[in-house]
Amino acid sequence: MTDFGLSKEHSELRETVRRFAVDRVAPVIADFYDRHEFPYQLVKQMGAMGLFGLPFPSELGGMDGDYLALCVALEELARVDSSVAITLEAAISLGAMPIFRFGTDEQRKRWLPSLIAGENLAAFGLTEATSGSDAGRIRTTARMDESAGEWVINGGKVFITNSGTSITSLVTVTALTGPDEISAIIVPSGTPGFTVAPGYSKVGWCASDTHELTFDNCRVPAENLLGERGRGFAQFLSILDEGRIAIAALATGLAQGCVDESVRYAQQREAFGAPIGSYQSIQFMIADMESRAHTARLAWRDAAARLVAGEEFKRQAAIAKLHASTVAVDNARDATQIHGGYGFMNEYPVARMWRDSKILEIGEGTSEIQRLIIARDLGMK
């Protein structure tokens, strides 16, 4: 059977991750989710599988894969749980990828091996309390102390994934390094003046790690500048373009997981003397859910294929992210409806999927921002 857009290697990866998600993640994740606890053991297992190294070259310890491989893995993980999937997505596309794309040879050698092995995690510090969609309006500053050869960072970041685990090794932050000049700077965990607040109480993604960060005269060496001074904002926008494909794949996985659970439930649950799946109203609802998930998959695979081929993909990434996130929310709503009262109980996976779906229309660029990107790319300035 042809798996559209996937090579034999991609298809084999898909099956491997699917088995891991079903056999290892599914039996335990609900307990982590209920306790708002980070699943360190699952992260360790993903590291041993090489998942954190999927899109990186072997000379750095990676798997010599590509961004399509990463997205395939994310979709299969999210079919079972989004907290585990977003941990992998943020660790790679937001944590390690900026260093891989823009770091010096020394920065790559220092930080990437442990990140690619999954032994450590890195975070991406862009969002601030007063600058979400308007990401260029940051207030965090970094002043160069020439006498000490150090950046002095002051400010704060919010909603930062993977920033406070015991294995987090660094956060890359954007900061004003001059008038209208935004740069990216690597801040190692444990640096004096760098404080990680307690984790948020969240509606969803309850087994992922999310914190507010503050920087109070936090000093790091001048060589921790990531990329070119003054190019930090442009660098991070390009990282977000790639990340939107990954989030679209994750959203597709959640949407497909809703189909999986709904088919299973509809075949078992009886009402009025027959399985509810025998009623046309339920059949049509599930058919619509499957159609949505299928088209979302085509959208993210198209964007990923363009990225891998070195073609322009900005608009396609925005389309994929916009469509897949909407599909995830719609499928989660319908899956909950199909489950009836049980869909409102946390013991059923669809309740977790319902709670996890909404953030997909917000994180890594809201749906409104995606529409703006698409319109502008069509020439509507």
Image (cartoon, grey):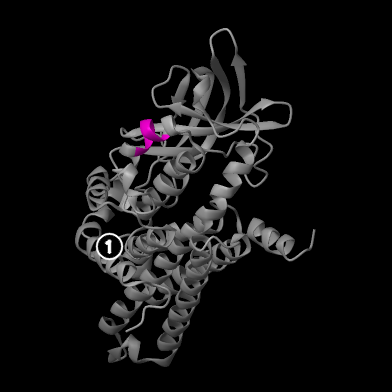
Amino acid residing under circle 1? Val
Q: Does the magenta stretch include residue 178?
A: no
Residue drawn where x is 48% and y is 18% of the image: 193
Horizontally, residue 130 falls left or right of residue 67, namely right
Q: Where does label 1 land, which residue?
A: 17
Residue 272 spot, x, y in % from top left: 32, 90
Q: Relative to residue 242, is residue 177 drawn left or right?
A: right
Kindly tell me whether residue 201 is visible in this rendering. no
Residue at horizontal 49%, vertical 26%? Answer: 224
- Residue sitting at 47 percent across and 81 percent down? 291
Above/below status of 75 relative to 121: below
Q: Is residue 284 left or right of residue 317?
A: left
Residue 19 coordinates in the image, percent (x, y): 22, 65
Q: Is residue 262 visible?
A: yes
| Horizontal and vertical percent position of residue 10 | 34, 67
Residue interval drawn in magenta:
108-112
Image quadrant where residue 279 sits: bottom left
Left-right relation of 27 to 179: left
* Above or below 229: residue 281: below
Q: How many marks?
A: 1
